Amino acid sequence: MKKIVITGAANGIGKATAVACVKAGYYVIAADIDRLGLQTLQAILPPHRLETHLADFSQAHVYQSFISNLYDVHKHRALYALVNNAGIYHGKSIYDYTNAEVDEIWAVNLKSLVYLSKDFARRESAAGYSRSIVNITSVAGEVGSMDALYGATKAGVIGLTKANAWNFAPRIRVNAVSPGLIRDTSIHDRIPEHRRREYERQEIIKEPIQPDGVADVILFLLSEQSRHMTGKVIAVDNGAYPR
């Protein structure tokens, strides 16, 4: 059974992706700082297809050891894919960030991806068949954000995706999903109302995007159906920002 690591798996896009992956026949290793959210995931998914880890990816000792611990401590012999979904969004001006918040968003949204990705690639680069990394960026990383730190880190995810597609080839494909306005997530409620209205005005498909709509695209990028794709950024935004 192919094993997929999903960070930020307790809520929103991460939770929807975990559910979709289990339905598709994968074994999910779900990591999140939200203990109650992980418990909810345990309640809805079969225990023989799910493993959960309480993990704070703002902490260097966590993201620097997480992947190696899956192999060396938890005795996983091989991992098929990594979904870097964990992220934070404050929805406020750069002037209002504390030094601690700057360090935290940098660590969770970008720096942890550097370590998780390279450690996964180092372990799996000699695998007999291709592996996949899917990074979750944002439309904010492509067109900007009133939350400058969020937009900057998500732009960094795009750069990292493209660079690692080169670094980890040919065995490991690296792609990214760039969501627009996604409902029923913790981020949605933090977006200022005027920005939500602007996103909605730009959408040319009017059916609201739910987390499972993003999960469907992630599942495609994990599958062999996308075997010829690497270094790509796939927008899931109802056509709001043609680019």
Image (cartoon, helix red, strand yellow):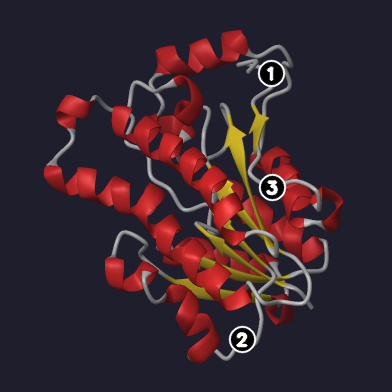
Give residue 39's position: percent from left, percent from top. 53, 69
User: Nearer the viewer's eye, disc 1 or disc 3?
Assistant: 3
Mark 3 vs mark 2: which is more N-terminal?
2
The secondary structure type at the circle numbered 3 is loop
Residue displayed at 72% across by 82% down:
48
For residue 135, say whether it is visible: yes
Q: Is residue 149 left or right of residue 174?
A: left
Name which residue type carries label 3.
Answer: Thr
Vertical relation: 39 (above or below) 9: below
User: Nearer the viewer's eye, disc 3 or disc 2?
Assistant: 3
Where residue 76 is drawn, which disc sits there? 2
Give residue 54's position: percent from left, percent from top. 43, 72
Mark 1 vs mark 2: which is more N-terminal?
2
Near-viewer residue (35 or 140): 140
Give residue 56's position: percent from left, percent from top. 35, 64
The N terminus sits in image quarter: bottom right
Where residue 239 is drawn, which disc sits there? 1
Vertical relation: 172 (above or below) 47: above
Residue density around tag 3, few if under 14, some if 14–19, many if 20 or more, within 10 Å: many
Residue displayed at 29% across by 73% down:
61
Residue displayed at 83% across by 62% down:
24
Vertical relation: 49 (above or below) 243: below
Q: Residue furthest right?
A: 225
How far is mark 3 from mark 2, CA to CA?
25 Å
Name which residue type carries label 1.
Answer: Gly
Where residue 230 is drawn, which disc sits there? 3
Mark 1 vs mark 3: which is more N-terminal?
3
Quarter assignment of residue 17: bottom right
Name which residue type carries label 2.
Answer: His
Give residue 136's position: percent from left, percent from top. 55, 45
Asked whether the residues under the numbered discs 1 and 2 touch, taking CB atoms below 8 Å apart as contact, a structural biologist would say no
The secondary structure type at the circle numbered 2 is loop
